[in-house]
Amino acid sequence: MPRPLKVGVLLPDTENQMDGASAEWADLAALTRTAEAVGFDSVWVTDHLIHRADKPLDTPVVIGGDLRELEGPWECWSLLSAIAAITTRVEIGTLVICNSFRNPALLAKMADTVEENSGGRLILGLGAGWNEPEYRAFGYPFDHRVDRFEEGIEITTSLLRTSHCDFDGRWYQIRDCELRPRGPRPEGPPIVIGTAGERMLGLTARYADGWNTWFSQTNNDLEQLKALMKRVDAACEAQGRDPKSLSRSSAVKVEIGPHTPSTMSVDPLTGGPEALADQLRDYAAAGLDHVQLWIEPNTVAGYEAFARVLELLDQR
């Protein structure tokens, strides 16, 4: 019997996230291989450049998740390319790529290359960005992020879905651009937009194959997630789109065993394997197609312990 929803795992790609330790590539490779071996459907990485508290430095940034004063992540696309090379079955995804960090035509080129490297297993998660300190640190403009995203998503989707784009906007100019060669899927990977903003929800309904939210936007609470999904439905209806044609996913924090307290301060789903499996069935019944789990502890042992939950989900 098929699973009621796909279950992915978020890798600890930032300092201090691997049960208090900082994962190197050998650790991330071991986690990825374990996730594939025990039956997860997907593996995900985030896209940040530095996590740093805004002024004053002892005040943590809390939008998008609690952070220590200074933490560094590994670069998203470099990790994803390596993950594609060491896996054969799991889907690989970005949660989510920041439009501001890369030219949208180059982004399409990078995405279709990873799509090729993975044999058609990429899920391209996109967003407008939110963390102002990393913009300043790496020299990216923080203004008009949604305006820039609106132009960028048109360029990226045009190239991935038609192989061609000619665009003259305020923020981007793309001249007779061709995406060649192409990866294994003629229209490229599925595109998922992560957002809770009204304007971004409209762009999601217009351009995306799927929608995603992070657990801090719902306090890891299913009832709050249901309320947010009603807004997703309304955005689809406003665009004249059948809401059922847009897939839904959410990051969810779960606790499978003892762990070092993390900076992800929302309350996790808890309980034994049966209780966790039942809670994930509730997410499926609410309309989610996919969850990206932040597992505590985010270690090989944590993934292996969660394998029993996956077995239970497969039974009914």
Image (cartoon, helix red, strand yellow):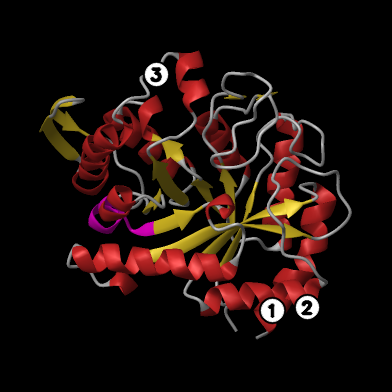
Residue under label 1, please give it: 278
Helix, strand or loop status at disc 2: helix
The N terminus lies in quadrant: bottom right
Mark pair 1, 3: CA separation: 43 Å
Magenta-colored segment: predominant secondary structure: helix
Please name the residue shown 28% across and 62% down the image: 235
Q: Is residue 1 above or below residue 233?
A: below
Is mark 2 in CB contact (under 8 Å) with mark 1? yes
List x then y, in percent, for residue 16: 76, 33
Instruction: Judge left or right: residue 255 versus residue 51.
Output: right
Front-most of residues 81 and 16: 16
Helix, strand or loop status at disc 3: loop
Q: Residues within 10 Å of mark 3 (few under 14, many from 20)?
A: some
Mark pair 3, 2: CA separation: 46 Å
Front-most of residues 233 and 295: 233
- Segment tinted magenta in the rendering: 203-210
Q: Which mark is residue 140?
A: 3
Residue under label 2, please give it: 274
